[in-house]
Image (spheres, rainbow, N blue to C red):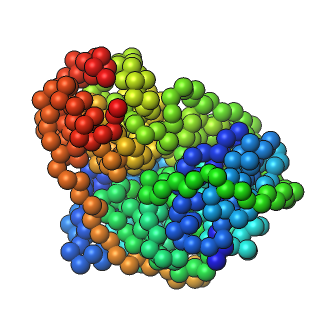
């Protein structure tokens, strides 16, 4: 069997989540090819060639792939698809955007957000915000799959795969990129962090998120937020952890002033160790926390920061 | 400009779903159902476009058994002009849903189709993108802002690192993210008025599409329970536990 994995990147670095998607591909089993589609993305290609368990890296370096526009990228993947039984992408916003388009162009179903592989055609995925776990069999001859990375281990990066350059240009000509407004942060990405500290509505305002920063600095943590905090305008949406935000599973997740709505739990309950700080002893977050402390966060956070 | 809004009837977002004891599926008997929250945002956006004089007609559409007429009536009460129910008792794959919608797009020729980015039951996040592929339209997924500029629509998208804005030729597909708008509540007079708005029922079989399933649901189980944790009395105790028991900080 042959598996194509589309590399998630920003033209300069390969996103760590791709290593977990390759982990999922290894669990399916077969020859693994990576596709890097971008512009001036040689650093990504170099990193991709080092990913373990990969036979070949296909590179399409062209301006039409610079922003990974779904209309152009899906045409490229569809063109390459005939050589592969499985096509995998990471279930991040880029993969979620173009992969269903690939599936429809190939006239096959997509299996979204798999967290485990039962066999080459049967996969495990969460439904209902993770309140139920479905085992789904694909009846199509080709499987188009997005991978939720919290379910798989990252592969190592001391490989040496062959790199093949393709000059295929698939320009749908129906969409264009206008601008990016990206959050600049010195901290690790939510998806890659081993420690995350998140604030909820209990933080009361955006300024108070500064109370999390000192702790995050000491722990090398990323900072997240619940949907309630995002909806209240405290912080931008790209910090949102939950069913419709980012799905994370760090070694340590510290939930501060977060009540624990099912939509939030869906995004973090696979974390190894969960700490909840909340002044309401009845908050549902305590039911999933390994360690809970009933305290006013405005007392607890400065104390935690000073004692770490 | 005509705007088509496909919507889905799903479990109410406040209700925690139960898995059936035989693990065949989830148990939705006697469960409160509602419009999928993202679809509600899609209706709201379409209605606002109409109020702004950009859209001329808003058509709500849903695929399912008779019960989804309830959600279509809600869409009409929120401001849609007419509704279409494609009737089927099957639980169709997203690809087949997209194929049915493609037929309606061909008939109605909307300039814009707005859908929710995902339904909170199957959590697939596929239908809008698939419809875009089948109709050859560009897509602006996970939208937090939709602006018409000349003959294009600019869609600002919620992406992992922040926001991305793309310009799409029309006709186009937009899927909604949570921050696009805050949906209104239907007023009682509008709920009464909605009862008289047109709702057409069309059997799925009449569209001449092969709707055979592409996936098979083998099993549905409850998620693994986390073992009960402990409550700590002080920050000192918390740090001690994290350092020496869980060993997640140094």
Splitting the image into 4 quarters, where does residue A130 fall?
bottom left
Q: Nearer the viewer, residue A134 or A42?
A: A42
Q: Is residue A213 above or below residue A255?
A: above
Would residue B137 be visible to someone looking at this image?
no
Q: Quadrant of the C terminus of chain A?
A: top left
Residue found 25% across the figure and 68% down from its top? B19
Q: Position of residue A49 (x, y in %)?
A: 71, 54
Position in image of residue A274 (x %, y %): 28, 42
Residue A90: name its quadrant: bottom right
**Front-most of residues B128 and A305:** A305
Q: Is A105 left or right of A126, judged from the image as shown?
A: right
The N terminus of chain A, quarter of image: bottom right
Residue B106, horizontal then vertical, whole percent? 66, 66
Instruction: Judge left or right: residue A303 versus residue A116.
Output: left
Q: What residue is drawn where x is 31% and y is 63%?
A: A132
Image height of A304 relative to B75, above or below: above
Q: Nearer the viewer, residue B21 or A4?
A: A4
Q: Position of residue A94 (x, y in %)?
A: 61, 49
- Residue B238 at least partly seen: yes
Tell me which corner region of the image, top left, top right, bottom left or bottom right, holds residue A258.
top left
Q: How many marks?
A: 0
Q: Is residue B140 above or below residue B25?
A: above
Q: Residue at x 38, y 78 (%)?
A: B218
Q: Residue at x 66, y 33 (%)?
A: A180
Q: Nearer the viewer, residue A133 or B45?
A: A133
In the depicted structure, whether residue A195 falls above or below residue B71: above
Going by the image, does B28 lie left or right of A171?
left
Q: Residue furthest right?
A: A167
């Amino acid at each position: 069997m042959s598996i194509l994995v589309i590399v998630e990147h920003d033209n300069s670095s390969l996103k760590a989540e791709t290593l977990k998607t390759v982990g999922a591909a290894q669990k399916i089993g077969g020859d693994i090819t990576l596709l890097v589609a971008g512009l001036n993305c040689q650093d990504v290609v170099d990193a991709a060639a080092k990913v373990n368990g990969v036979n070949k890296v296909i590179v399409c370096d062209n301006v039409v792939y610079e922003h990974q526009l779904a209309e152009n990228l899906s045409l490229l993947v569809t063109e390459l698809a005939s050589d592969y039984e499985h096509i995998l992408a990471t279930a991040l916003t880029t993969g979620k955007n173009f992969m269903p388009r690939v599936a429809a162009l190939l006239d096959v179903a997509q299996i979204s957000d798999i967290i485990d592989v039962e066999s080459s055609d049967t996969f495990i995925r969460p439904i209902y915000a993770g309140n139920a776990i479905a085992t789904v069999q694909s009846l199509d001859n080709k499987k188009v799959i997005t991978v939720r990375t919290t379910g798989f281990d990252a592969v190592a990066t001391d490989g040496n795969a062959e790199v093949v350059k393709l000059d295929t240009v698939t320009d749908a000509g129906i969409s264009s990129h206008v601008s990016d407004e990206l959050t600049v942060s010195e901290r690790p990405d939510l998806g890659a962090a081993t420690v995350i500290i998140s604030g909820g509505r209990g933080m009361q305002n955006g300024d108070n998120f500064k109370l999390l920063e000192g702790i995050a600095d000491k722990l090398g943590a990323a900072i997240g937020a619940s949907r309630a905090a995002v909806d209240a305008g405290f912080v931008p949406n790209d910090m949102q952890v939950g069913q419709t935000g980012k799905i994370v599973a760090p070694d340590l997740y510290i939930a501060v002033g977060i009540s624990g709505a099912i939509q939030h739990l869906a995004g973090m309950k696979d974390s190894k160790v969960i700490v909840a700080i909340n002044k309401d002893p009845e908050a549902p977050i305590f039911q999933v926390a390994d360690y809970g402390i009933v305290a006013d966060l405005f007392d607890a956070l400065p104390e935690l920061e000073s004692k770490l | 400009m005509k705007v088509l809004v496909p919507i889905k009837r799903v479990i109410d977002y406040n209700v925690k779903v139960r898995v059936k004891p035989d693990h065949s599926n989830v148990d939705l008997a006697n469960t409160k159902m509602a419009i999928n929250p993202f679809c509600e945002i899609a209706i709201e956006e379409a209605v606002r476009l109409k109020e702004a004089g950009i859209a001329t007609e808003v058509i709500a559409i849903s695929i399912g058994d008779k019960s989804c007429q309830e959600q279509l009536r809600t869409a009409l009460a929120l401001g849609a002009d007419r509704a279409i129910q494609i009737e089927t008792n099957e639980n169709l794959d997203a690809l087949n849903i997209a194929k049915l919608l493609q037929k309606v797009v061909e008939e109605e020729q909307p300039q814009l189709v707005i859908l929710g980015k995902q339904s909170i039951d199957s959590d697939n996040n596929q239908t809008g993108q698939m419809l875009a592929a089948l109709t050859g339209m560009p897509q602006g997924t996970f939208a937090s802002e939709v602006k018409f500029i000349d003959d294009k629509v600019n869609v600002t998208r919620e992406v992992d690192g922040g926001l991305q804005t793309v310009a799409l030729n029309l006709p186009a597909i937009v899927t909604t993210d949570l921050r696009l708008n805050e949906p209104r509540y239907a007023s009682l007079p509008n709920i009464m008025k909605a009862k008289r708005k047109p709702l057409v029922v069309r059997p799925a079989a009449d569209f001449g599409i092969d709707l055979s399933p592409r996936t098979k649901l083998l099993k549905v189980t409850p998620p693994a329970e986390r073992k009960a944790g402990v409550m700590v009395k002080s920050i000192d105790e918390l740090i001690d536990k994290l350092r020496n028991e869980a060993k997640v900080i140094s």
